[in-house]
Image (tube, rainbow, N blue to C red):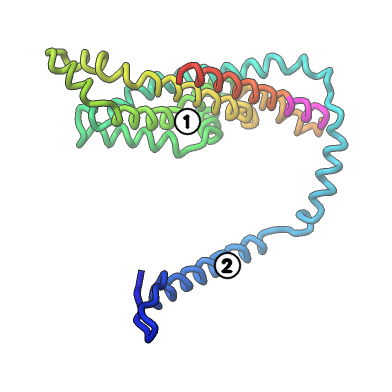
């Protein structure tokens, strides 16, 4: 904090002249970038449709109410497929994420120079691509259906689970590991008795948390042909069956709320 001398004594100021000018310049630069981006967005936007959006939304809402409750019998199997996609995808991701996490953690990787970068690359690459894109690629390779959705969810979840898990591995108490090592235990025994018990609560929490996320993601995979209730939603949208759309959205909302409640109860029991 600069001090400026004056006839009445030192005057305390938060910033000197250079810092103040730099701060104002950064504000000016940020506003200029925002205005430029806004102008580009405005040029690419048809504002007539934007101003007409409230009327269109009201018309669709009127067509969608009340929901077509008789259509609920057609949704039990799709919502079951959605739950299977999320659950099996999460299990598959955890099976692959655990060894990836141990290879990525600094204190457990066999080689920080060669193996750890490969494990980190797997984590980054699987996290950087959305599950919808994975589903599109897999549908082109293995065809549409629930299996493509399961694989897409699994691949997408590997990086998420492995990243959180390897961070938990790196934060373990090394004194417990040293105590097990001092008994003459092998590398695998040290891992089983010194590391795994410390990360089990984190592993359980990560698994439940990711399953909760996958419930949400699996509801929309059907929009690209990967099975689940999203397939029914896409079919209803294509035929403009708005009462069916509103019912499907309510079922999706109920499934998400129930999964959130279950995951919260499980995390509370674990923690």
User: Furthest residue to the bottom?
Assistant: 7
What is the count of numbered marks?
Answer: 2
Asked if the stretch drawn in magenta spans residue 75, the answer is no
Which x, y percent locates residue 53?
79, 50
The chief SS type of the magenta part is: helix
Question: At numbered mark 2, what does the secondary structure look like: helix, strand or loop?
Answer: helix
Image x and y of residue 165, in percent = 37, 27
**Above or below — where is 131 with respect to 6?**
above
Q: CB of mark 1 within 8 Å of CB of mark 2?
A: no
* Residue 139 percent across, percent down from the top left: 55, 28
Task: Write the residue at 40% across / 78% down.
Answer: 17
Q: Position of residue 1 (x, y in %)?
A: 36, 68
Q: Which residues are magenta?
A: 242-250
Residue 96 lies in quadrant: top left
Q: Check the image and report above or below for 98 versus 54.
A: above
Left or right, 20 with reference to 221: left
Q: CA distance from mark 1 to mark 2?
A: 35 Å
139 versus 194 height, above or below: below
Q: Is residue 190 left or right of residue 90?
A: left
Return the residue at label 1: 156
- Element under disc 1: helix
- Whether residue 247 appears in magenta in the rendering, the answer is yes
Q: Nearer the viewer, residue 116 or 133?
A: 116
Residue corresponding to mark 2 = 36
| Farthest residue, direction front | 8
Report the quarter where the C terminus lies.
top left
> Residue 170 shows which numbered tag?
none
Check disc 1: other Cα within 10 Å, few if <14, some if 14-19, many if 20+: many
């Amino acid at each position: 904090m600069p001090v400026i001398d004056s006839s009445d004594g030192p005057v305390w100021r938060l910033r000197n002249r250079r810092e103040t000018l730099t701060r104002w310049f950064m504000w000016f630069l940020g506003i200029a970038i925002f205005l430029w981006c806004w102008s580009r967005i405005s040029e690419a936007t048809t504002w007539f449709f934007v101003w007409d959006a409230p009327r269109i939304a009201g018309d669709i809402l009127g067509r969608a109410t009340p929901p077509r409750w008789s259509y609920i019998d057609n949704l039990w199997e799709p919502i079951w497929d959605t739950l299977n996609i999320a659950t099996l995808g999460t299990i598959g991701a955890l099976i692959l994420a655990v060894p990836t996490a141990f290879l990525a953690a600094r204190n457990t990787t066999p080689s920080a120079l060669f193996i750890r970068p490969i494990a980190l690359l797997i984590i980054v690459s699987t996290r950087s691509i959305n599950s919808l894109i994975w589903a599109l690629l897999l549908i082109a390779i293995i065809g549409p259906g629930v299996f493509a959705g399961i694989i897409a969810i699994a691949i997408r979840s590997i990086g998420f689970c492995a990243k959180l898990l390897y961070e938990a591995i790196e934060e373990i108490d090394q004194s417990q590991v040293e105590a097990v090592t001092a008994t003459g235990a092998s590398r695998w025994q040290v891992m089983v008795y010194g590391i795994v018990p410390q990360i089990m609560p984190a592993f359980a929490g990560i698994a439940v948390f990711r399953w909760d996320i996958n419930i949400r993601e699996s509801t929309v995979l059907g929009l690209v042909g990967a099975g689940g209730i999203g397939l029914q939603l896409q079919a209803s949208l294509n035929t403009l069956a708005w009462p069916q759309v509103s019912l499907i959205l309510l079922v999706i909302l109920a499934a998400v709320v129930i999964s959130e409640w279950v995951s919260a109860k499980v995390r509370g029991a674990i923690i």
